[in-house]
Amino acid sequence: MGGVKLVATTQSFFCTRVQWALKLKGVEYEFIEEDLRNKSPILLKYNPVYKKVPVLVHHDTPIAESLVILEYIDETWKENPLLPQDPCDRAAARFWAKFADEKVVFGVWTACTMEGEGKEKAIEAALESLAHLEKQIEGKKFFGGEQIGYLDLVLGWIPHWLNTMEEVGGMKLLEAEKFPCLIEWGQNFIHTPLIKECIPPREKLIEYLTASLSYLRSLAAKKP
Amino acid sequence: MADEVVLLGFLPSPFAARLKIALAEKGVEYEYKEEDLRSKSPLLVQMNPVHKKVPVLIHNGKPICESLIALQYIDEVWNDKAPLLPSDPGLRAQARFWADFIDKKEMIWAAKEEEHEVAKEFFDCIGVLEGQLGDKAFFGGETLGFVDVAVIPFYSWLSVFEKYGNCSVEAKHPKFTAWTKRCMEKESVSKSLPDQRRVYDFKVGGILTKLPIDQDL
Protein backbone atom coordinates (compact mmCIF):
# COMPACT_ATOMS: atom_id res chain seq x y z
CA MET A 1 0.00 0.00 0.00
CA GLY A 2 2.42 2.63 -1.18
CA GLY A 3 2.00 6.02 -2.78
CA VAL A 4 1.18 8.16 0.26
CA LYS A 5 1.90 11.88 0.11
CA LEU A 6 1.04 14.54 2.63
CA VAL A 7 0.78 18.13 1.45
CA ALA A 8 1.25 20.11 4.62
CA THR A 9 3.14 22.68 6.65
CA THR A 10 5.30 21.92 9.67
CA GLN A 11 3.70 24.64 11.80
CA SER A 12 0.05 23.70 11.41
CA PHE A 13 -1.23 21.32 14.04
CA PHE A 14 -4.00 20.27 11.65
CA CYS A 15 -1.18 18.80 9.58
CA THR A 16 0.77 17.37 12.52
CA ARG A 17 -2.24 15.38 13.68
CA VAL A 18 -2.25 13.60 10.32
CA GLN A 19 1.49 12.88 10.60
CA TRP A 20 0.91 11.43 14.06
CA ALA A 21 -1.80 9.13 12.70
CA LEU A 22 0.40 7.90 9.86
CA LYS A 23 3.32 7.26 12.22
CA LEU A 24 1.14 5.42 14.74
CA LYS A 25 0.03 3.15 11.92
CA GLY A 26 3.56 2.68 10.61
CA VAL A 27 2.68 4.18 7.22
CA GLU A 28 5.52 5.57 5.11
CA TYR A 29 4.73 8.84 3.40
CA GLU A 30 6.30 11.67 1.48
CA PHE A 31 5.98 15.05 3.20
CA ILE A 32 5.46 17.88 0.73
CA GLU A 33 6.01 21.23 2.45
CA GLU A 34 3.62 23.90 1.29
CA ASP A 35 4.19 27.68 1.38
CA LEU A 36 0.74 29.05 2.15
CA ARG A 37 1.68 32.57 1.06
CA ASN A 38 2.43 31.16 -2.37
CA LYS A 39 0.20 28.14 -2.89
CA SER A 40 1.55 25.48 -5.21
CA PRO A 41 -0.25 24.05 -8.25
CA ILE A 42 -0.21 20.72 -6.38
CA LEU A 43 -2.27 22.13 -3.50
CA LEU A 44 -4.68 23.88 -5.85
CA LYS A 45 -5.10 20.66 -7.83
CA TYR A 46 -5.62 18.42 -4.81
CA ASN A 47 -7.79 20.78 -2.74
CA PRO A 48 -9.62 23.07 -5.15
CA VAL A 49 -12.52 23.58 -2.74
CA TYR A 50 -10.62 25.07 0.22
CA LYS A 51 -7.00 25.38 -1.05
CA LYS A 52 -5.83 24.46 2.47
CA VAL A 53 -3.51 22.00 4.13
CA PRO A 54 -3.39 19.19 5.07
CA VAL A 55 -4.21 17.10 2.02
CA LEU A 56 -3.45 13.40 2.05
CA VAL A 57 -2.86 11.92 -1.38
CA HIS A 58 -3.11 8.13 -1.59
CA HIS A 59 -2.54 6.48 -4.98
CA ASP A 60 -3.14 9.91 -6.50
CA THR A 61 -6.56 10.32 -4.79
CA PRO A 62 -6.66 13.41 -2.58
CA ILE A 63 -8.44 13.63 0.76
CA ALA A 64 -8.86 16.99 2.47
CA GLU A 65 -10.02 18.13 5.94
CA SER A 66 -7.95 16.73 8.79
CA LEU A 67 -10.78 14.94 10.62
CA VAL A 68 -11.90 13.27 7.38
CA ILE A 69 -8.27 12.28 6.74
CA LEU A 70 -7.91 10.76 10.23
CA GLU A 71 -10.95 8.55 9.67
CA TYR A 72 -9.66 7.55 6.23
CA ILE A 73 -6.29 6.57 7.72
CA ASP A 74 -8.03 4.57 10.45
CA GLU A 75 -10.18 2.70 7.94
CA THR A 76 -7.41 2.04 5.43
CA TRP A 77 -4.64 0.90 7.81
CA LYS A 78 -6.17 -1.32 10.45
CA GLU A 79 -3.29 -1.71 12.96
CA ASN A 80 -3.39 0.45 16.14
CA PRO A 81 -7.01 1.56 15.74
CA LEU A 82 -7.55 5.25 16.48
CA LEU A 83 -11.32 5.32 16.96
CA PRO A 84 -12.96 3.07 19.57
CA GLN A 85 -14.98 0.04 18.43
CA ASP A 86 -18.25 0.81 20.18
CA PRO A 87 -20.55 3.10 18.11
CA CYS A 88 -21.51 5.18 21.17
CA ASP A 89 -17.85 5.75 22.08
CA ARG A 90 -17.08 6.57 18.45
CA ALA A 91 -19.86 9.16 18.42
CA ALA A 92 -18.52 10.67 21.65
CA ALA A 93 -14.98 10.90 20.22
CA ARG A 94 -16.30 12.57 17.06
CA PHE A 95 -18.44 14.95 19.14
CA TRP A 96 -15.50 16.13 21.23
CA ALA A 97 -13.25 16.41 18.17
CA LYS A 98 -15.81 18.69 16.50
CA PHE A 99 -16.25 20.67 19.71
CA ALA A 100 -12.50 21.05 20.07
CA ASP A 101 -11.95 22.23 16.51
CA GLU A 102 -14.93 24.58 16.49
CA LYS A 103 -14.94 25.99 20.01
CA VAL A 104 -11.61 25.37 21.71
CA VAL A 105 -9.28 26.18 18.80
CA PHE A 106 -11.35 29.17 17.81
CA GLY A 107 -11.66 30.31 21.43
CA VAL A 108 -7.96 30.08 22.17
CA TRP A 109 -6.96 31.75 18.91
CA THR A 110 -9.44 34.57 19.52
CA ALA A 111 -8.10 35.07 23.05
CA CYS A 112 -4.64 35.19 21.50
CA THR A 113 -5.43 37.74 18.80
CA MET A 114 -7.79 40.04 20.73
CA GLU A 115 -6.49 43.14 22.38
CA GLY A 116 -8.03 45.55 24.87
CA GLU A 117 -11.54 44.97 26.25
CA GLY A 118 -12.46 42.03 24.08
CA LYS A 119 -9.46 40.03 25.32
CA GLU A 120 -10.86 39.35 28.82
CA LYS A 121 -14.14 38.09 27.42
CA ALA A 122 -12.36 35.95 24.84
CA ILE A 123 -10.17 34.44 27.56
CA GLU A 124 -13.25 33.61 29.63
CA ALA A 125 -14.89 31.86 26.68
CA ALA A 126 -11.72 29.90 25.97
CA LEU A 127 -11.46 28.81 29.61
CA GLU A 128 -15.08 27.65 29.55
CA SER A 129 -14.46 25.47 26.53
CA LEU A 130 -11.23 24.06 28.01
CA ALA A 131 -13.14 23.16 31.20
CA HIS A 132 -15.22 20.68 29.18
CA LEU A 133 -12.02 18.94 28.09
CA GLU A 134 -10.69 18.83 31.67
CA LYS A 135 -13.85 16.94 32.66
CA GLN A 136 -13.44 14.50 29.78
CA ILE A 137 -9.84 13.55 30.62
CA GLU A 138 -10.39 13.19 34.39
CA GLY A 139 -9.42 9.70 35.52
CA LYS A 140 -7.95 8.70 32.16
CA LYS A 141 -4.39 8.51 30.91
CA PHE A 142 -5.36 9.39 27.35
CA PHE A 143 -8.68 10.41 25.81
CA GLY A 144 -8.42 7.07 23.99
CA GLY A 145 -8.01 5.20 27.29
CA GLU A 146 -4.74 3.38 27.88
CA GLN A 147 -3.48 4.12 24.37
CA ILE A 148 -3.35 7.28 22.30
CA GLY A 149 -6.44 7.51 20.09
CA TYR A 150 -8.26 9.76 17.66
CA LEU A 151 -9.25 12.39 20.20
CA ASP A 152 -5.71 12.61 21.61
CA LEU A 153 -4.43 13.39 18.11
CA VAL A 154 -7.15 15.99 17.56
CA LEU A 155 -6.36 17.69 20.89
CA GLY A 156 -2.63 17.13 20.55
CA TRP A 157 -2.06 20.82 19.77
CA ILE A 158 -2.71 21.68 23.38
CA PRO A 159 0.61 20.69 25.01
CA HIS A 160 2.86 22.46 22.48
CA TRP A 161 0.91 24.94 20.39
CA LEU A 162 -1.34 26.28 23.13
CA ASN A 163 1.48 27.34 25.41
CA THR A 164 3.20 28.98 22.46
CA MET A 165 -0.03 30.87 21.70
CA GLU A 166 -0.16 31.91 25.36
CA GLU A 167 3.32 33.38 25.08
CA VAL A 168 2.70 35.13 21.77
CA GLY A 169 -0.80 36.30 22.75
CA GLY A 170 0.22 37.49 26.21
CA MET A 171 -2.25 35.43 28.23
CA LYS A 172 -2.32 32.42 30.54
CA LEU A 173 -5.03 29.84 29.98
CA LEU A 174 -3.81 26.46 31.16
CA GLU A 175 -3.24 27.11 34.86
CA ALA A 176 -2.21 24.15 37.02
CA GLU A 177 -4.93 24.62 39.65
CA LYS A 178 -7.71 24.77 37.07
CA PHE A 179 -6.52 22.14 34.58
CA PRO A 180 -4.38 19.57 36.42
CA CYS A 181 -5.68 16.58 34.42
CA LEU A 182 -5.39 18.26 31.03
CA ILE A 183 -1.84 19.37 31.81
CA GLU A 184 -0.83 15.88 32.95
CA TRP A 185 -2.38 14.36 29.84
CA GLY A 186 -0.52 16.92 27.73
CA GLN A 187 2.80 15.94 29.24
CA ASN A 188 2.16 12.22 28.75
CA PHE A 189 1.11 12.87 25.18
CA ILE A 190 3.86 15.20 24.03
CA HIS A 191 6.63 13.05 25.55
CA THR A 192 5.55 9.95 23.64
CA PRO A 193 8.48 9.45 21.19
CA LEU A 194 6.40 9.11 17.97
CA ILE A 195 4.50 12.25 18.92
CA LYS A 196 7.52 14.28 19.94
CA GLU A 197 9.38 13.69 16.69
CA CYS A 198 6.72 15.51 14.61
CA ILE A 199 6.39 18.72 16.57
CA PRO A 200 7.84 21.88 15.06
CA PRO A 201 10.71 23.59 16.95
CA ARG A 202 9.36 26.09 19.44
CA GLU A 203 11.32 29.07 18.08
CA LYS A 204 9.98 28.47 14.56
CA LEU A 205 6.46 28.17 15.90
CA ILE A 206 6.80 31.41 17.88
CA GLU A 207 8.09 33.14 14.74
CA TYR A 208 5.18 31.81 12.69
CA LEU A 209 2.52 32.67 15.28
CA THR A 210 3.94 36.14 15.86
CA ALA A 211 3.84 36.82 12.13
CA SER A 212 0.26 35.48 11.83
CA LEU A 213 -0.81 37.55 14.81
CA SER A 214 0.59 40.83 13.50
CA TYR A 215 -0.92 40.16 10.09
CA LEU A 216 -4.38 39.52 11.60
CA ARG A 217 -4.12 42.52 13.89
CA SER A 218 -3.09 44.74 10.96
CA LEU A 219 -6.17 43.55 9.05
CA ALA A 220 -8.37 44.32 12.03
CA ALA A 221 -6.82 47.79 12.33
CA LYS A 222 -7.65 48.52 8.70
CA LYS A 223 -11.35 47.73 9.19
CA PRO A 224 -13.60 50.79 9.53
CA MET B 1 -34.03 -6.10 25.02
CA ALA B 2 -36.05 -3.86 22.70
CA ASP B 3 -34.30 -0.72 21.50
CA GLU B 4 -35.61 2.55 22.83
CA VAL B 5 -35.02 5.36 20.37
CA VAL B 6 -36.05 8.95 20.93
CA LEU B 7 -35.41 11.90 18.63
CA LEU B 8 -35.50 15.46 19.94
CA GLY B 9 -36.15 17.77 17.02
CA PHE B 10 -37.69 20.96 15.71
CA LEU B 11 -39.98 20.88 12.71
CA PRO B 12 -38.23 23.37 10.40
CA SER B 13 -34.80 21.97 11.27
CA PRO B 14 -33.05 20.38 8.29
CA PHE B 15 -30.60 18.82 10.75
CA ALA B 16 -33.33 16.96 12.63
CA ALA B 17 -34.88 15.94 9.29
CA ARG B 18 -31.63 14.19 8.37
CA LEU B 19 -32.10 11.82 11.27
CA LYS B 20 -35.79 11.27 10.51
CA ILE B 21 -34.86 10.19 6.97
CA ALA B 22 -32.07 7.88 8.15
CA LEU B 23 -34.24 6.21 10.77
CA ALA B 24 -37.01 5.74 8.20
CA GLU B 25 -34.58 4.29 5.65
CA LYS B 26 -33.40 1.80 8.25
CA GLY B 27 -36.93 0.95 9.41
CA VAL B 28 -36.18 1.99 12.99
CA GLU B 29 -39.12 2.78 15.23
CA TYR B 30 -38.66 5.82 17.41
CA GLU B 31 -40.47 8.37 19.49
CA TYR B 32 -40.28 11.93 18.18
CA LYS B 33 -40.38 14.86 20.60
CA GLU B 34 -40.82 18.38 19.23
CA GLU B 35 -38.78 20.96 21.11
CA ASP B 36 -39.86 24.52 21.70
CA LEU B 37 -36.50 26.23 21.26
CA ARG B 38 -37.72 29.32 23.11
CA SER B 39 -38.31 27.13 26.14
CA LYS B 40 -35.98 24.16 26.06
CA SER B 41 -37.08 20.99 27.80
CA PRO B 42 -35.15 19.63 30.80
CA LEU B 43 -34.57 16.53 28.68
CA LEU B 44 -32.83 18.52 25.94
CA VAL B 45 -30.67 20.38 28.44
CA GLN B 46 -29.80 17.11 30.17
CA MET B 47 -29.04 15.25 26.93
CA ASN B 48 -27.10 18.04 25.20
CA PRO B 49 -25.64 20.10 28.05
CA VAL B 50 -22.74 21.40 25.95
CA HIS B 51 -24.74 22.96 23.10
CA LYS B 52 -28.39 22.61 24.18
CA LYS B 53 -29.32 22.19 20.54
CA VAL B 54 -31.41 19.84 18.44
CA PRO B 55 -31.34 17.26 17.02
CA VAL B 56 -30.43 14.82 19.75
CA LEU B 57 -30.79 11.10 19.17
CA ILE B 58 -31.30 9.17 22.40
CA HIS B 59 -30.64 5.43 22.10
CA ASN B 60 -31.42 3.37 25.19
CA GLY B 61 -30.96 6.48 27.31
CA LYS B 62 -27.63 7.55 25.74
CA PRO B 63 -27.56 10.82 23.80
CA ILE B 64 -25.85 11.33 20.44
CA CYS B 65 -25.54 14.99 19.44
CA GLU B 66 -24.62 16.72 16.17
CA SER B 67 -26.60 15.53 13.15
CA LEU B 68 -23.76 14.18 10.98
CA ILE B 69 -22.31 12.33 13.96
CA ALA B 70 -25.74 10.88 14.74
CA LEU B 71 -26.14 9.87 11.05
CA GLN B 72 -22.92 7.88 11.26
CA TYR B 73 -24.06 6.36 14.53
CA ILE B 74 -27.37 5.27 12.97
CA ASP B 75 -25.46 3.79 10.03
CA GLU B 76 -23.11 1.86 12.33
CA VAL B 77 -25.75 0.52 14.72
CA TRP B 78 -28.48 -0.38 12.22
CA ASN B 79 -26.08 -1.79 9.68
CA ASP B 80 -28.30 -4.54 8.32
CA LYS B 81 -30.29 -2.31 5.99
CA ALA B 82 -29.91 0.71 3.68
CA PRO B 83 -26.22 1.58 4.22
CA LEU B 84 -25.66 5.34 4.07
CA LEU B 85 -21.88 5.34 3.80
CA PRO B 86 -20.20 3.19 1.13
CA SER B 87 -17.76 0.48 2.20
CA ASP B 88 -14.70 1.84 0.36
CA PRO B 89 -12.63 4.16 2.63
CA GLY B 90 -11.91 6.59 -0.22
CA LEU B 91 -15.59 6.95 -1.08
CA ARG B 92 -16.45 7.24 2.60
CA ALA B 93 -13.96 10.08 2.91
CA GLN B 94 -15.55 11.83 -0.08
CA ALA B 95 -19.01 11.48 1.47
CA ARG B 96 -17.84 12.86 4.81
CA PHE B 97 -16.06 15.73 3.05
CA TRP B 98 -19.16 16.81 1.10
CA ALA B 99 -21.52 16.49 4.04
CA ASP B 100 -19.12 18.63 6.08
CA PHE B 101 -18.91 21.11 3.17
CA ILE B 102 -22.59 21.99 3.39
CA ASP B 103 -22.43 22.26 7.19
CA LYS B 104 -19.55 24.72 7.13
CA LYS B 105 -21.81 27.23 5.42
CA GLU B 106 -24.20 27.87 8.37
CA MET B 107 -26.84 29.37 6.15
CA ILE B 108 -30.05 28.95 8.05
CA TRP B 109 -29.71 31.81 10.47
CA ALA B 110 -29.45 34.77 8.18
CA ALA B 111 -30.07 38.13 9.76
CA LYS B 112 -32.09 40.43 7.50
CA GLU B 113 -29.08 42.30 6.14
CA GLU B 114 -27.29 39.01 5.34
CA GLU B 115 -30.11 37.40 3.39
CA HIS B 116 -28.86 38.16 -0.09
CA GLU B 117 -25.32 37.05 0.80
CA VAL B 118 -26.59 33.83 2.31
CA ALA B 119 -28.71 33.06 -0.74
CA LYS B 120 -25.69 33.56 -2.96
CA GLU B 121 -23.63 31.25 -0.76
CA PHE B 122 -26.37 28.64 -0.78
CA PHE B 123 -26.67 28.67 -4.55
CA ASP B 124 -22.89 28.58 -4.97
CA CYS B 125 -22.92 25.51 -2.73
CA ILE B 126 -25.64 23.90 -4.84
CA GLY B 127 -23.56 24.56 -7.95
CA VAL B 128 -20.54 22.81 -6.46
CA LEU B 129 -22.64 19.87 -5.30
CA GLU B 130 -24.20 19.55 -8.76
CA GLY B 131 -20.70 19.05 -10.08
CA GLN B 132 -20.18 16.25 -7.59
CA LEU B 133 -23.47 14.59 -8.47
CA GLY B 134 -22.54 14.37 -12.14
CA ASP B 135 -24.77 11.90 -13.97
CA LYS B 136 -25.56 9.80 -10.93
CA ALA B 137 -29.13 9.40 -9.73
CA PHE B 138 -28.04 10.10 -6.17
CA PHE B 139 -24.79 11.13 -4.47
CA GLY B 140 -24.84 7.61 -3.06
CA GLY B 141 -25.10 6.10 -6.57
CA GLU B 142 -28.27 4.12 -7.24
CA THR B 143 -29.71 4.70 -3.79
CA LEU B 144 -29.78 7.41 -1.14
CA GLY B 145 -26.45 7.82 0.58
CA PHE B 146 -24.90 9.90 3.33
CA VAL B 147 -24.62 13.09 1.27
CA ASP B 148 -28.17 12.75 -0.10
CA VAL B 149 -29.55 12.47 3.43
CA ALA B 150 -27.37 15.38 4.58
CA VAL B 151 -28.42 17.72 1.77
CA ILE B 152 -32.04 16.91 0.84
CA PRO B 153 -33.55 18.46 4.00
CA PHE B 154 -32.57 21.87 2.58
CA TYR B 155 -35.28 21.19 -0.01
CA SER B 156 -37.76 22.43 2.57
CA TRP B 157 -35.84 25.70 2.69
CA LEU B 158 -35.72 26.31 -1.06
CA SER B 159 -38.58 28.83 -1.11
CA VAL B 160 -36.79 30.78 1.62
CA PHE B 161 -33.52 30.89 -0.32
CA GLU B 162 -35.34 31.71 -3.53
CA LYS B 163 -36.93 34.69 -1.81
CA TYR B 164 -33.59 35.84 -0.34
CA GLY B 165 -31.85 35.46 -3.66
CA ASN B 166 -34.77 36.62 -5.77
CA CYS B 167 -34.33 33.71 -8.15
CA SER B 168 -35.61 30.27 -9.08
CA VAL B 169 -33.68 27.14 -8.12
CA GLU B 170 -35.11 25.18 -11.04
CA ALA B 171 -33.92 27.78 -13.52
CA LYS B 172 -30.45 28.11 -11.98
CA HIS B 173 -29.86 24.47 -11.11
CA PRO B 174 -31.95 22.02 -13.15
CA LYS B 175 -29.75 19.03 -12.25
CA PHE B 176 -30.12 19.71 -8.54
CA THR B 177 -33.87 20.17 -8.98
CA ALA B 178 -34.15 16.81 -10.76
CA TRP B 179 -32.21 15.19 -7.92
CA THR B 180 -34.54 16.72 -5.30
CA LYS B 181 -37.52 15.26 -7.19
CA ARG B 182 -35.93 11.80 -7.20
CA CYS B 183 -35.31 12.07 -3.45
CA MET B 184 -38.85 13.24 -2.75
CA GLU B 185 -40.19 10.13 -4.52
CA LYS B 186 -38.84 8.15 -1.59
CA GLU B 187 -41.27 7.83 1.28
CA SER B 188 -38.49 8.08 3.86
CA VAL B 189 -37.77 11.56 2.50
CA SER B 190 -41.23 12.89 1.67
CA LYS B 191 -42.62 11.86 5.05
CA SER B 192 -39.69 13.35 6.95
CA LEU B 193 -39.52 16.80 5.42
CA PRO B 194 -41.76 19.71 6.43
CA ASP B 195 -43.68 21.53 3.71
CA GLN B 196 -41.75 24.29 2.00
CA ARG B 197 -44.71 26.57 2.68
CA ARG B 198 -44.56 25.86 6.36
CA VAL B 199 -40.85 26.63 6.60
CA TYR B 200 -41.30 29.77 4.47
CA ASP B 201 -44.06 31.11 6.74
CA PHE B 202 -41.97 30.23 9.75
CA LYS B 203 -38.75 31.89 8.62
CA VAL B 204 -39.98 34.73 6.47
CA GLY B 205 -42.91 35.20 8.85
CA GLY B 206 -40.28 36.25 11.37
CA ILE B 207 -40.88 33.73 14.13
CA LEU B 208 -37.30 32.50 13.97
CA THR B 209 -35.91 35.99 14.44
CA LYS B 210 -37.30 35.89 17.96
CA LEU B 211 -35.13 32.90 18.80
CA PRO B 212 -31.63 33.25 20.25
CA ILE B 213 -29.06 33.60 17.49
CA ASP B 214 -27.01 30.57 18.43
CA GLN B 215 -29.65 28.01 17.58
CA ASP B 216 -28.79 25.00 15.52
CA LEU B 217 -32.06 24.09 13.98
Image: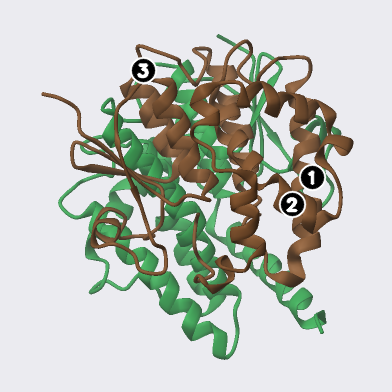
Give the letter of the green chain. Answer: A
Protein image colouring: by chain
Residue type marked 1: Phe
Residue assigned mark 1: B123
Mark 3 or 1: in front is: 1
**Which picture quadrant has residue B133?**
top right
Q: Are marks 2 and 3 on the same chain?
A: no
Residue type marked 3: Glu
Residue assigned mark 3: A79
How many angstroms separate mark 3 from mark 1 (CA)? Answer: 42 Å
* Marks 2 and 3 close (CB-CB < 8 Å): no
* Marks 2 and 1 close (CB-CB < 8 Å): yes
Residue type marked 2: Phe
Does A8 sit above or below residue B162? above
Lower position in the chain sequence, tag 2 or tag 1: 1
Residue A208 appears in the figure = no
Disc 3 secondary structure class: loop
Residue assigned mark 2: B161
Name the spot of residue A54 as percent of width and height, x first: 64, 38
Q: Rate crowding at label 2 as few (under 14), some (14 to 19) or many (20 or more) other CA atoms within 10 Å.
A: many
Q: Colour of chain B?
A: brown
Quadrant location, the N terminus of chain A: top right
Q: Nearer the viewer, residue B174 or A75?
A: B174
Q: Nearer the viewer, residue B50 or B9?
A: B9
Disc 2 secondary structure class: helix
